[in-house]
Amino acid sequence: MPNPTLQVFDKNLKRTGTLIDAYNIERRRRLNSDYELSFLVPMTSEDYLEKIQIKGHVRDERGQYYVINTRQRQRDKKKLTAQITCTHVMFKLNDYKVPYDEYIDEAYGIHISTLLNKISAWTGGRFTFQIHDTFDMWDIKDFGRTTALAALNQVINTYKAEIRPDNFVIHIHKKIGSQNDRYEYRTKKNIISDSFKDDSTNLVTRMYAHMKDGRTWVGMSADNLTAEERSLLQSVPGAISNGKVMVNYLLSPYVNYWGSDSVPFFDGENIQQDIEDPVELLKSTREELRKKEMPELEVTVTAADLYKIDREEHPPDLGDSATVYDPQLGLQRIAVRIVELTEYPYSIDQHSNVTLANFALKDDIDLIADLERSRKVMDNLLSGGRIRTEVFEAFAKQAVIDINNSKTEIKYEARGIVLESKPNPLDQVIMTSNGIILSRDGGKSAMTAITAEGIAAPAIIGQLGSFVSMLIGSGNNITQINTNGIAAGHASFGSAPFRVDMQGNVVANRLTANSANIYSSNFTNGAIVGSSINVGNGVFTVSQYGHMVAESGEFRGNIRASTIDGGTINGTNITGADILGSRIRTASYGERIELDPDGFVFYDGYNARRVTLGTNPSANISGHTYYNSSSQSQGLIYASDYELHVIGTNGVRIGANFGTTTLQGAVHFNNGSSVTGLVLSIGQISGLITQLNSLQSQIDSLRSNFNTHSHTVYLPSHNHGNTQNQNWGDRSFPTSTP
């Protein structure tokens, strides 16, 4: 359900409260036109006395801000009521005057974003635009002469766009609203009352076309026509000759349906002064004919707002395509668009009034923007409802002076007819039998002369009309303008070193441009040489030193570089000296190998870590760690100073399925070590037995020698320091064997 009432804000969009006493809240929106909101409020209420301010704002349930422009007070006996009228903040664009130096006299091939960016800049960035579709480029004439709103209106009309304002963000579409016929107006469902009008006043079945300087597409290749257009024109004798279109009109496929014996065609005209390309004129005429080859239909419906009581129902929106079914009025599910909505969002008993049509109604933005200049002129003549006589008298006086000064005296002389200026008799126009002379010295010399030979003048100011050919120079040292285009440097158009054909294709031996906007390019045998490249305001740049920066990129082929710094590299082959980065992996998930500054890691198909390879500088070791399917360590192989360690968490198995397991070098078992399951045959230990027998023989020999050994010991006489224990030795004593 919608919010119960409006929110109110001051001129700086700071909230001041809620409009509790507002009633009869009505919102009116038209396609590419005004967005207006009005309501009533008692003048004795707090809403009126404290909250509502001129140039303040209100916000509806859609979150859209409206500017309070009008407060109309009215008395009904003792009842004092104010009617408040507000316009959408989009119309603040009318308050921004375009700077004089921003005016565009004429420009060619302009993208819609260029003009919208200018409008945004004129508002100091307060208004921005979002483009949701692709628009063709157009030539622009007289852009930005008045206000930002008038400039936006010119953009809409030129590029055939539709707008959807979201406060200060204006969305640009080719067509707004839903186009899937999701909304249906049908009797016995939601139509309370309706009216239906079809109008053939503007019906056109043959559309003539003219572009800038009165030119047409006559002589254009018929290949630019659709199959239907070509078939219709071929029914007219001489309309297509030698593969070229020889008429400047298109025919509607309904020409026979609407035509009669007395009026076979309903003619219309499409004049586009901003177009210079015949193909663009053809596209424009095609669109205009499609709009007018059927009668204009307009249906006005008062429809029940079912969405207010049933949330599954969708509310109608501006620009939506819809169908209408009321067979008693001749409405047999015709397809139309919602071009105007009058809504009562806060009243459940008031229903929307909808205008549906198969054409665009008159655009009120046109009226607002175009009348702005006239309003300011009248404001200068009127003050407080009274004529400012001093301004009006000065205007009238100057007008009389200008009229008198413009009078010319006509004389008939031997020279011919002389038109002589009364303020300055030396200014003369002399018409003779040989030509016309324009003189500033009474006819002594000619500033400009028009004779049978041609025109002689220091300058020709203005626009020249249609010409078959214009030549400057002679031989191959010539510049020519003809039906082929513009060429210079050769008498033959196709051999000229510089030429521009009617399709805008340019051939030039050398091009020097102080400034250029290139929307599409093709360099065949050339090179781009410049200090830097900047595309998309920094999206892609190349500095004068060859440093390239890009938001993203795709390369087909090989990339060769000495160093690559970055995050992710996808490709088949990478050739270079060094690859520097935080991580390299063969896949983002599942079975893969990853390399990062900590080492190698191998993952299985279930994303479990199975093998790691790395170093531990603090322990002065490096090696492998092996894990089971649950990423639990089962053992490691690592190297320290002068040793290689093989350690199992639960056990170590060393074996060979087919070959021999060889232990090379000395084998050492720590104290307490034991060996189980060792089975050796005599043949496998024959060498060991021989060595043990030899060792046993040596032991037996040592034992025998020890048992049979004897010797004598000589002891001198001594008493151990006591004469009472005198021992008389001084002789040898034999030993005994054990």
Image (cartoon, rainbow, N blue to C red):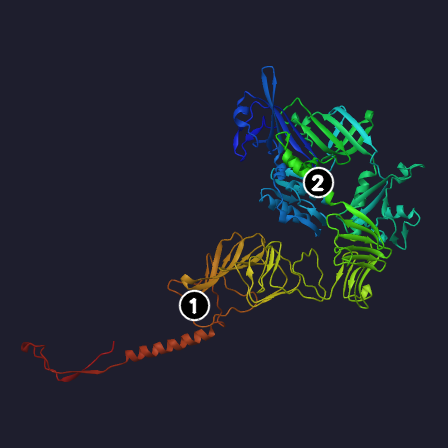
Residue 366 in the figure: left or right of residue 733: right
Residue found at x 92% / y 50%: 238
User: Nearer the observer, disc 1 or disc 2?
Assistant: 2
What is the number of the mark on residue 39? Answer: none
Q: Position of residue 140 (x, y in %)?
A: 71, 49
Report whether residue 601 is seen.
yes
Q: Amino acid at mark 2?
A: Ala
**Which element type, helix, strand or loop, lies under badge 2?**
helix
Residue found at x 64% / y 62%: 572
Q: Is residue 211 above or below residue 202?
A: below
Residue found at x 74% / y 64%: 508
Q: Which sits in the foreground, 351 or 267?
A: 267
**Image quarter of residue 702:** bottom left
Q: Quadrant of the N terminus?
A: top right
Q: Residues within 10 Å of mark 1 (few under 14, many from 20)?
A: few
Residue 90 in the figure: left or right of residue 617: right
Say which residue label 2 marks: 399
Q: Residues within 10 Å of mark 2 (few under 14, many from 20)?
A: few
**Which element type, helix, strand or loop, lies under badge 1?**
strand
Separation (CA) of disc 1 from disc 2: 112 Å
Q: Which sits in the foreground, 599 or 387?
A: 387
Say which residue label 1 marks: 643
Q: Amino acid at mark 1?
A: Glu
User: Hey, which residue is sitting farthest top in the picture?
Assistant: 77
Q: Position of residue 213 (x, y in %)?
A: 79, 50
Report whether residue 282 is seen.
no
- Determine whether label 1 and label 2 are within 8 Å by CB: no
Residue 510 in the figure: left or right of residue 621: right
Q: Is residue 689 above or below residue 116?
A: below
Q: Earlier in the sequence, mark 1 or mark 2?
A: 2
Q: Quadrant of the C terminus?
A: bottom left
